[in-house]
Image (cartoon, helix red, strand yellow):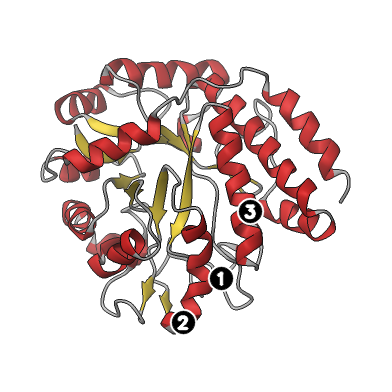
Amino acid sequence: MQPTFMGLAGLTISAQERALFREYDPAGYILFKRNVDTPEQVRALTAALTDLAGRPLPILIDQEGGRVARLRPPHWPEFPAGQVFDRLYDIAPVTAIEAARLNALALAALLKDLGITVDCLPLLDVRDPQGHDIIGDRSFGAEPMKVAAMGRATLDGLRQGGVCGVVKHIPGHGRAAADSHLELPIVTASRADLERDFEPFRTLNTAPMAMTAHVTYTAIDPERCATLSPLVIDLIRNDIGFQGLLMSDDLGMQALGGPDKADFGARALASLAAGCDIALHCSGDFHEMRAICEVVSPISDAAAARLVAAMAGIGSGDNRTSAHWAEKRDRLLAVA
């Protein structure tokens, strides 16, 4: 098994992809809008990926709610963005926390029905007034304690529904003034000021999985972004205390150099050498995937153990429908 999570190009596994995946055995896969059409098609795709791997499989998706959602109407319902729970928290904190848990249960029920086992949620990025809107309304708010409380509720709801959650973007993206999809954000805040960004991740450092930020924090490592920095990943492990499965954010994002400078094999190796357990590649571009697969060594024993621990019990849990939990959530959201 290789320490990679890979995207796919389309609605089915192509012959090229099937041969590549059979040869190199990625640890898991991630789905995007280009990979989903109808519930029946998604179930067939996730079943085919699982059959190809021959084992229970992390199949990821970014289904946050709001503007970040790969599954959309008419086949799937809309879900609220993090800011909705942030506003409710200001009125009724306990109600907001329970609404976040029920929302995650509704998400988990929807995903589990499709064979999707991991949701890249919750964001623990603390919103900052100077930060880029790439986080914006996706965040649970500007107060670390509030973000952690609703992040914990989301992790709990996903797990209760049989889906694994992923905290992101560790150690904190909210202060970044640029979109890492398009350029490298550089955060110049002091180490002391960064504690505000780290706090939710430290509070939830027992989360099963985390995704790194493609952000440079000059107070920790002025030369390398978090994904590629042994110094930042040492901080994640030994200061923040996160010991779960650590994946990179997408290796195709321009924060790592832009498409004209892309050496995807080198990016994957650098992220793994820095201390990531898994290199994430999202585009589904076959040549990029092959470049990664040809140079990456088999997954380490430590990373494999973290993956097994993160996925333990996934797929079981409550079997009530997504609509059941969404109705209960909506009753609480009506308070706002």
Residue 232 spot, x, y in % from top left: 31, 67
Gap between marks 1 and 3 measured at Cα? 23 Å
Nearer to us in this view, 155 or 182: 155
Residue at point 21%, 29% (across, down): 25
| Residue at the image point whose x is 31% and y is 36% from the top | 307
Question: Looking at the image, is mark 1 or mark 3 earlier in the sequence?
Answer: 1
Residue 192 bears which disc, if any?
2
Secondary structure of the residue carrying tag 2 is helix
Q: Position of residue 13 (x, y in %)?
A: 33, 23
Which quadrant is the N terminus positioned in? top left
Mark earlier in primary sequence (1, 2): 1
Mark 1 residue element: loop
Q: Relative to 147, say whether 78 is above or below.
A: above
Q: Quadrant location of residue 285?
A: top left
| Horizontal side of residue 6 vs 138, given as left or right | left
Label 3 and label 2: CA atoms lie apart by 22 Å
x 56%, y 35%: residue: 158
Q: Position of residue 139 (x, y in %)?
A: 62, 58
Amino acid type for the residue under numbered disc 3 = Ala
Mark 3 Cα-neighbour bin, 10 Å: few <14, some 14–19, many ≥20 = many
Disc sitting over residue 149 in the figure: 3
The furthest residue to the right: 335
Within-10-Å neighbours for mark 2: few <14, some 14–19, many 20+: few
Q: Amino acid at mark 1?
A: His
Q: Position of residue 145 (x, y in %)?
A: 63, 62
Q: Amino acid at mark 2?
A: Ala
Q: Kindly indicate whether the residue at mark 2 contacts the one at mark 1 (C-beta within 8 angstroms).
A: no
Q: Which mark is first along the chain, 2 or 3?
A: 3
- Asked whether the beta carbons under mark 1 and mark 3 sit within 8 Å of each other, the answer is no
- On the question of residue 258 being in view, the answer is no
Task: State the residue position of label 1.
Answer: 132
